[in-house]
């Protein structure tokens, strides 16, 4: 079969009749390579140009039925199918697979059509998005983080091959035979990234673009000397792999492996802390596992579970560890184990929070001597300078207490302070000379003590013993007039110590 016969058979397969197929071939498209040179816009114009070039020869016998198969026409479905043929041809060509007319089967046609729709959806979804570039690489010690961000960034960029630009700097130049035969890929992008040829017009354009993107992030850092030699040819693939080899040499690989193993040996979880939660502990193990897997030393699931449990030193999780060890489902499944532990910790935290809230609610209704004095708290009374004070948790000793500390004490704690200070003098005041502190008392300390003592009497809501509300024989004028002022002034007059 000649090339002309093959292309005619292909055109008939996608919906053109004999007359139209011959007319298209007459336009110079006698091979599939020629047809593939037409982009989608030119295919739309093909019908107009072909129809203009067709010479209609009158029939010799007007009464003879018209042969419809010879009438030149361009059905819309056939034109769209021709675009599918072109798309299929270029993908096959980039993959290095046969792209002759005989290879365009119904299955290939359907798969190509699905890929075209997929590419249209990808283009639509990424139309208004701008991928975030990695920061400039200023330190080769931060290569791993930079590399992960670089792969993510280029994975969102599509070039002449209509696939992610990561194919340019993949590890293999030609897909290994075993992978080719297995053909196990999650999606079309992954398959094309692994198989697309690193030659041709598409690769030349994408390779140059990748170099310019990479250079902008490396030129001002320590990595530039290692890729400068590829600057003249703008060889992105060679530049990237050269710097990657430099940054991920044997010493780097060994250091990365040792760091991952150290996580399993040294990381401990002793309970929830502000800067280290169970999520942080799990994340460290997962990162170490990922590093070893990338280095080709993936630990077994049982070993990973064993190391993970060995690092948990929180006594409250002992029952949880026992359940895991006794259940083969968890011993053989690291993801299941870490999710179970995380759920247990979250449940315990919620229970503790509920218990604390319940305790506070009961305490608010309690009427014994351990209740919060009415002078402090958010419900009323006086507040400290820092707002609602927390319960006093220190040891009650014979020392001076600030107003905030005094308000935070329970009635029993205040009574302990009174007992330590000794009995009050005959004037109704405490023996302040009995109070000692770790440091020398200052005037401010004395003032605070007097204020605290005053608050003590105020918040106890009792009158001083031995002092009636009104002295015998006193009148209202003695209490509120000049006599009261004179008595008050005399009472608080400064005395001179003999």
Image (cartoon, rainbow, N blue to C red):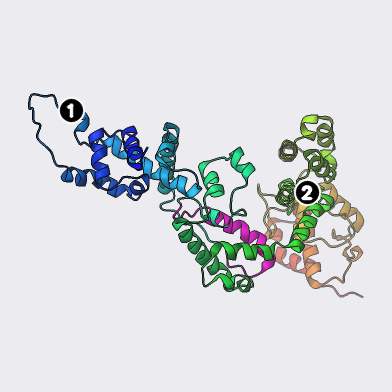
Residue 462 numbered tag: 2
- The residue nearer to you, when weighing 6 against 295, is 6
Left or right: where does residue 413 sit relative to residue 123? right
Image coordinates of residue 430 in percent, x first then y, are: 86, 60
The answer to whether any part of residue 464 appears in the image is no
Q: Residues within 10 Å of mark 2 (few under 14, many from 20)?
A: few
Per the image, label 2 sits on a secondary structure element best described as: loop
Image coordinates of residue 136 in percent, x first then y, are: 58, 68
The region drawn magenta spans: 135-161
Q: CA distance from mark 1 to mark 2?
A: 121 Å
Q: Which residue is mark 1?
A: 67
Look at the picture and state if 458 lies above or below 251. Answer: above
- Residue that appears at 78% across and 49% down: 462
- Residue that appears at 66% across and 69% down: 139
Q: Is residue 146 magenta?
A: yes
- Residue that appears at 68% across and 64% down: 247
Q: Is residue 315 magenta?
A: no
The C terminus: image quadrant: bottom right
Q: Nearer the viewer, mark 1 or mark 2?
A: 1
Residue farthest along the front direction in this orientation: 1
- The residue nearer to you, when weighing 385 against 70, is 70
- Residue that appears at 24% across and 44% down: 26
């Amino acid at each position: 079969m000649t090339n002309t016969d093959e292309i005619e058979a292909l055109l008939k397969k996608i919906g053109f009749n004999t007359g139209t197929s011959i007319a298209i071939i007459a336009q110079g498209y006698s091979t599939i390579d020629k047809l593939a040179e037409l982009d989608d816009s030119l295919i739309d114009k093909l019908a107009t140009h072909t129809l203009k070039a067709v010479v209609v020869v009158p029939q010799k016998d007007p009464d003879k039925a018209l042969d419809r198969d010879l009438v030149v026409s361009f059905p819309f479905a056939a034109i769209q199918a021709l675009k599918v043929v072109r798309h299929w041809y270029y993908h096959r060509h980039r993959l290095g697979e046969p792209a002759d007319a005989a290879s365009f089967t119904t299955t290939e046609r359907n798969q190509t059509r699905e890929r075209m729709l997929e590419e249209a959806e990808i283009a639509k979804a990424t139309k208004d998005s701008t991928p975030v570039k990695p920061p400039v690489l200023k330190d080769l010690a931060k290569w791993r983080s930079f590399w992960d961000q670089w792969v993510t960034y280029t994975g969102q960029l599509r070039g002449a091959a209509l696939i992610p630009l990561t194919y340019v700097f993949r590890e293999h130049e030609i897909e290994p035979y075993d992978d080719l035969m297995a053909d196990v890929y999650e999606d079309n992008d992954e398959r094309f990234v692994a198989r697309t040829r690193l030659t041709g017009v598409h690769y030349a354009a994408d390779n140059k673009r990748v170099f310019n993107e990479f250079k902008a992030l490396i030129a001002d850092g320590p990595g530039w000397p290692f890729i400068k030699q590829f600057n003249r040819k703008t060889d992105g693939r060679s530049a990237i792999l050269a710097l990657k080899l430099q940054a991920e040499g044997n010493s780097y690989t060994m250091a990365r492996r040792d760091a991952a193993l150290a996580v399993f040996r040294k990381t401990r979880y002793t309970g929830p802390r502000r800067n280290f939660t169970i999520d942080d502990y799990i994340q460290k193990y997962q990162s170490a596992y990922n590093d070893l897997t990338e280095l080709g030393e993936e630990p077994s699931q049982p070993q990973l579970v064993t190391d993970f449990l060995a690092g948990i030193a929180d006594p409250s999780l002992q029952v949880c560890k026992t359940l895991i060890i006794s259940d083969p489902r968890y011993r053989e499944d690291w993801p299941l184990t870490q999710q179970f532990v995380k759920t247990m910790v979250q449940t315990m935290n919620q229970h503790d929070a509920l218990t604390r809230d319940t305790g506070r609610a009961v305490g608010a209704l309690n009427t014994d001597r351990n209740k919060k004095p009415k002078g402090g708290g958010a419900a009323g009374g006086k507040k400290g300078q820092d707002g609602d004070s927390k319960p006093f948790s220190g040891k009650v000793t014979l020392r001076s207490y600030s107003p905030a500390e005094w308000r935070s004490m329970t009635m029993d704690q205040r009574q302990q302070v009174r007992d330590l200070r000794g009995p009050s003098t005959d004037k109704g005041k405490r023996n302040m000379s009995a109070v000692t502190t770790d440091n020398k008392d200052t005037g401010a300390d004395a003032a605070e003590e007097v204020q605290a003592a005053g608050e003590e009497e105020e918040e106890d809501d009792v009158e001083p013993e031995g002092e009636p509300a009104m002295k015998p024989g006193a009148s209202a004028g003695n209490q509120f007039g000049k006599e009261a002022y004179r008595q008050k002034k005399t009472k608080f007059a400064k005395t001179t110590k003999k």
